[in-house]
Amino acid sequence: MKILGIEGMTPEQLNFELQRGGRFVIFQYAISVIVMSFRRASNVYFVRAGEGTTSKSFGFTVLTLLAGWWGIPFGPIFTVQALVTNFRGGKDVSKQVIASLNKPVPAAQPVTAAIS
């Protein structure tokens, strides 16, 4: 999982920002090609407390407006869903990301080679 916006932050700084109201969000975009339509999610973005999401969602919103609505029947449906999500500031995935970051990393298993 790639998280944009936390580069160079220590765990203490990240926790401080989260306590102040920071959150992890994803944005959606839709792409359609005549009879095939796709709705996808962006990478995870960290949004600091008081920071807007317009600049982060702008590219996904423009892509959706240009390429999302062409497919029948799901193009217009996916386009509206993606635009609503983006205009509302993205989908908050903070709980999932924090749980993932707090999960202990499993120890590497020793590699054994069979000699025959």
Image (cartoon, rainbow, N blue to C red):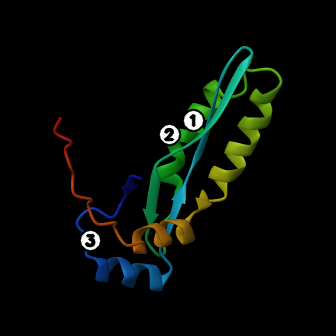
Residue 38's disc is: none
According to the picture, the residue beneath numbered tag 2 turns out to be 59
Residue lying at 38% horizontally and 82% vertically, measured from the top left: 15
The residue lying furthest to the left in this view is 115
> Circle 3 sits in a helix, a strand or a loop, which is it?
loop
Give the Cα separation between the discs numbered 2 and 3.
Answer: 25 Å
Q: Residues within 10 Å of mark 3 (few under 14, many from 20)?
A: few
Label 1 or label 3, whichever lies nearer to me, is 3
According to the picture, the residue beneath numbered tag 1 turns out to be 62
> Circle 2 sits in a helix, a strand or a loop, which is it?
helix
> From the viewer's perspective, is 9 left or right of 101?
left
Where does residue 39 sit, x and y in percent of width and height?
A: 65, 36
Viewer-side residue, 41 vs 21: 41
Residue lying at 37% horizontally and 56% vertically, measured from the top left: 4
The residue lying furthest to the right in this view is 73
Give the Cα separation between the discs numbered 1 and 2.
Answer: 5 Å
Looking at the image, residue 87 lies above or below residue 98: above
Q: Is residue 62 visible?
A: yes
**Residue type at numbered disc 1:** Val
Q: Residues within 10 Å of mark 2 (few under 14, many from 20)?
A: few
Give the Cα separation between the discs numbered 1 and 3.
Answer: 30 Å
